[in-house]
Image (cartoon, grey):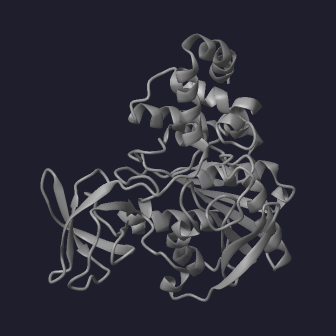
Amino acid sequence: MKSLRHAVALLVPAVAALGAAAALLVLGVARRVVMPGRRPSDTEIIAVDTGAQTIELVRTPDTELPGRYGLFTSGTAGYVKLGAVLSADAKTVRRKLLTKIEPGARLDRQAGFSGWYYSAPSELHLPWENVLIGSPAGPCPAWLFPASSSTWVIQVHGRGVTRAECLRAVPVLHAAGFPNLVVSYRNDGEAPRSRSGAYALGAAEWRDVDAAVSYALRHGAERVILMGWSMGGAVALQTAVSSGNRDRIAGLILESPVIDWRTVLRYQARELGIRAPLPDLAMGALSVPLTARLSGAEDAIPFDRLDMVARAEELAVPILILHSDDDGFVPADASHALHEARPDLVTMPPFSVARHTKLWNYDQVGWSDAITEWTRAQGFSASA
């Protein structure tokens, strides 16, 4: 894109003019984009009532919403499930605990609010097995939930999380007869680490997912549907346009997806108070091999190649996009743009209020119905 090329052209003289401190700032922002970080602590625990089995949290746009969620904690418990909002005021929200907290338990104040809900495949009470996918990165662990259809769903998690993120989608897909292969990929903390340990934002990770497609085809699949969550959407899209098996990829389900990284990174920079031109300079640094490596990336990030709105004409299979207009982390703008560019392929039912990758949590029925209706409309039956 012209703006990014312009940023690249300006990078060296801008750094020279602003000095070493500015160069370090640019590279520091770029590093935050590609390096895996710790799970964020985005709320605080105010109090736990073990008698009533309730928990009081600092009120945020996420913690105030109805539905079922998870909470990553430290102390006596590592992960607890949360239910309905019982009360709220301007600063706090009280929710029902769905994981029992025993009297005397100690939970640290800092916590991470999550849409995962399920944290392990055993919680779904469905048949499953551990498998290993031989990918270019090495053996990548995956969960296989067998079912009757020869159309398999391969699920791809997002940035900074693991495959447990995908478990929410298994029941509705399994009920429709689809085997689910829930995969890991390089640098996610479960699959092998690359030399740099950095994300390529989909530009390299797709090869691990392509290996999962090959695995499915070797084990009885006739075709596959790729389901990508957040950055997993970017990975799934790259697989769909780059895979040698792309003629066996029958469709895409994209949940809160990254369609164009520049849109996402500029939005997140604004939310963090990072002013222009720093975001474009950081992306410029990541697009040049030398400064990309100085930022921690293994290779230059091909932002043009990752822009699937610009590459919309290359898409050839039906796509279901599930994206809330109130996502709050990955804006839905690029998803709407892809819908507008390819209305012949893209179905995008309206969702709002729900936050990033938490549509299931906020509206499980509407979210599940959207998937069921789309798979039926595409003819992805259990017998095919």
Above or below for 5 versus 336: above
Indicate the position of residue 373 as horizontal and vertical percent values: 54, 65
Above or below for 129 versus 137: below
Decide if residue 163 is on the left or right side of residue 361: right
Decide if residue 348 is on the left or right side of residue 147: left
Decide if residue 105 is on the left or right side of residue 256: left
Q: What residue lies at 53% left-to-right and 86% top-to-bottom?
A: 122
Where on the picture, by quarter, is residue 292? Answer: top right
Above or below for 108 versus 263: below
The one of 27 and 86 positioned closer to us in this rendering: 27
- Labels in figure, total: 0
Q: Is residue 149 something one can see in this rendering? A: no
The one of 73 and 208 positioned closer to us in this rendering: 73
Quadrant of the drawing holding the N terminus: top right
Indicate the position of residue 53 as horizontal and vertical percent values: 20, 80
The one of 18 and 248 positioned closer to us in this rendering: 18
Indicate the position of residue 256 as horizontal and vertical percent values: 51, 52
Q: What residue lies at 67% left-to-right and 19% top-to-bottom?
A: 2
